[in-house]
Image (cartoon, rainbow, N blue to C red):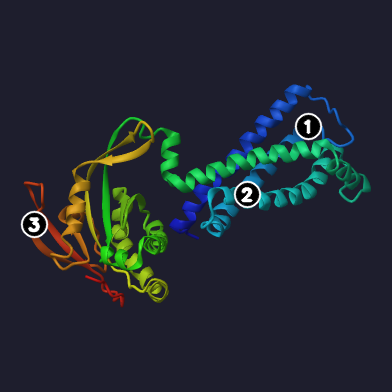
Amino acid sequence: MKLTPKAKRNISRIIPFAIIWLLIGWIIDITVYDVTRNQNLNPDTDISFTIPVLIFASLANVLVGLIVGVLEVVYLEKRFSNRTLRAKFFYKFLTYLTLFIIIIVLLFPVAFSLETGISLLEVDAWQKLGRFVISISFLTTLFHLSVKLMVSLIYSAISESLGHQVLLNFFSGKYHQPKIEKRIFMFLDMKSSTTIAEKLGHIKYFKLLGAYYNIMSDPIINSFGEVYQYIGDEIVISWKPDRGINQANCIKCFFDIRDHLNKQKEDLLREFGFEIGFKAGIHFGEVTIGEIGALKKEIVFTGDVLNTTARIQSLCNELKSDLLISGAVKELLPQTEYQYGSKGEIELKGRNKKEELFSVTSEKKSSITNNS
């Protein structure tokens, strides 16, 4: 069974939670082992450190980390998306605290059984659990779990804010020194945004942008695109060449966004009173990528390809096309269902060299109405 791009992305976001829990668990276990010199100071409530118990504890940490990761990425992230960061931490903490207590009640007797060889069916295993729950050791365990949880929630918040791939790039130091890479860029701009903003007002227009960008999320993920920037009502998406060209993903992304907007057309019309249209330009070329900033660090792309893509997008109305691509992109694309129509060689503002542009249409018809 082949995993979808979204499933692959979710897995790559979940795995760090397991790593966080495993590493912090090891640090705590090693610290406790060193401080106590492997002496069980509370034999009535605590479990002694043995190799089987340590292996079990490591597996339990990985399992709990994966559970937290799945809950964060698949469920809670969307559930609390409209909450403030403080509220997210509070409600998530209560949710996980309940989960932890359930896990402790289930796993403590298992660890006790591994330590002593006593069957889980014996009364002693459950009596020790009872003594543990009312002991200081139980509070210490909850504190250790809370530390792991807080680190997990901080990681989740940063990952959600920066973007998973950007966070990995920062951690790995991939772009600490500037690098030159080839990238495909799409500049996608909402149509009639000024008119819509004036009629809706600032707050409601902002909510519209939130809904608009949320609708785009799955098409971008499924085409292996990466969001570089949100600039008001414009979004900049990039692809590594192999991912963007494979099955014409960079083109597919545009039409998938249109299809998703079409499915949400009635809801958007009912809530905001407008049908949302957009136009886009796509270009390919070299960029310099690196970390930049003194007061705030960002991974920034610079290069003529960005300016050129923006200017291609700005010609959509003039050339009566919702999607324009450069000849550089057209040369790379495989044979697909999409139809290309040459608009001739166009002199772009600020460039001496002319660029041949192509309009792109799909054989799949969409009923979405694009405002001019």
The Cα atoms of the two marked residues, 3 and 2, are separated by: 56 Å
Residue 96 appears left or right of 111: left
Label 1 CA crowd tier, 10 Å (few <14, some 14–19, many 20+): few
Relative height, residue 37 to residue 337 (above, below): above
> What residue do we see at 24% from left, 67% from top?
338
Question: What secondary structure is found at the residue carrying circle 2?
Answer: helix
* Foreground label between 2 and 1: 2
**Residue annotated with mark 1:** 50
Question: What secondary structure is found at the residue carrying circle 3?
Answer: strand
> What residue do we see at 63% from left, 34% from top?
24
* Foreground label between 1 and 3: 3
> Identity of the amino acid at label 2?
Phe
Place of residue 36 in the rendered image (x, y in percent of width and height, measured from the top left): 78, 23
The Cα atoms of the two marked residues, 2 and 1, are separated by: 36 Å
Residue 223, by quadrant, is bottom left
Place of residue 150 in the rendered image (x, y in percent of width and height, measured from the top left): 61, 41
Question: What secondary structure is found at the residue carrying circle 1?
Answer: loop
Relative height, residue 350 to residue 213 (above, below): above
The Cα atoms of the two marked residues, 1 and 3, are separated by: 74 Å
**Residue annotated with mark 2:** 90
Residue 81 appears left or right of 119: left
